[in-house]
Image (cartoon, rainbow, N blue to C red):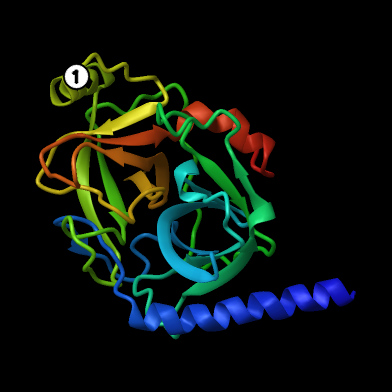
Amino acid sequence: MALLKWQIIFLTFLLYHLNDEVASEPIKRIVNGSNAVAKQFPYQTFLYTFKNYEWYATCGGVIISSRAVLTAAHCIADNAVAFIIFIGAVNLTDSLEPGQQRVIVKRSYVVVHPEWDEFQLINDIALIKLPVEVHFNEYVQPAKLPNPKHLYENEMGVVSGWGNTESSNTGSAILKYYVVGVLPLDECATILKELRGSASIVPQSYICLKPSDSSPCNGDSGGPLAIKNPDGHSTLLGLASFVVGACETNKPSVYTRVSSFLSWIKNHTDISG
């Protein structure tokens, strides 16, 4: 009981200092994106990481159930102590924003894919098990998991996040988004080969975005590529993994294809079907 009491005190201390830091530190955002509004992306989350006795604005994430959030594996630092998951937020600096929820999560609640390879940048996915159930409402809703038989090539999706607006450390606390097409894998491989100057093998677990005048950037990692369904809900296609160049536009961006990891996701959650 004493140990639990001290854990609660410690996590409360972390949250108190996070509120101070969020209010004073500029948040990075997406390159050439539009401002989002409340309820537009109810599945979107943001992670703050506590490590080395400091808070760091880290990555995006996606709600997939009342007790689970997906993000990128490279967002989870080995020396992380805890995370604050922002849910239902548009303005990260506004703790009184309608619909905004914040959940404290210890590092032990995070499952990183066992085959994550930081050098080859494959299997870049992690699952955060929430210690409490998220309250769903008009501001907060889970994204649906994708159809594993559908590649979604040439379909239009939407990317959202709080990453840089340009290759700098300045930005806004407001959620950004842009609409983009899904690039066929063979075309993605061709473009990556030209840009990197070497043969680029694009695994099936990648999903690439078509080059456009907008781009995800630092701070957008782990955030969603999603499509809107006729019923008004959204389906999660990918998680932001890496970009080619320094957040440059008109170059493809690479996401982790969520449909490649459905069995792994279901093994670690209560999601079925």
- Is residue 230 shown to the viewer in this render? no
Identify which residue, 100 or 220, lies in the foreground.
220
Relative to 262, 191 lies left or right: left
Q: Residue at x 55, y 83 (%)?
A: 16
Q: Residue at x 46, y 75 (%)?
A: 99
Image coords of residue 118 (percent x, y): 45, 34
Identify which residue, 100 or 170, lies in the foreground.
170
Relative to 250, 224 lies left or right: right
Image quadrant for the C terminus? top right
- Element type at mark 1: helix
Q: Residue at x 28, y 58 (%)?
A: 163
Relative to 246, 73 lies left or right: right
Image coords of residue 147 (percent x, y): 46, 30
Image quadrant for the N terminus? bottom right
Query: Which amino acid, by three-letter code, is at mark 1?
Result: Lys
**For residue 9, above or below residue 137:** below
**Residue at the limit of the structure toward the front, as seen here:** 52
Q: Name the residue that disc number 1 marks.
A: 193
Identify which residue, 78 or 30, lies in the foreground.
78
Identify which residue, 133 or 82, lies in the foreground.
82
Image coords of residue 131 (percent x, y): 69, 61
Image coords of residue 59 (percent x, y): 41, 56
Q: Residue at x 49, y 42 (%)?
A: 73
**Residue at the limit of the structure toward the top, as seen here:** 199
Mark 1 surroundings: few (<14), some (14-19) or many (≥20) residues within 10 A = some
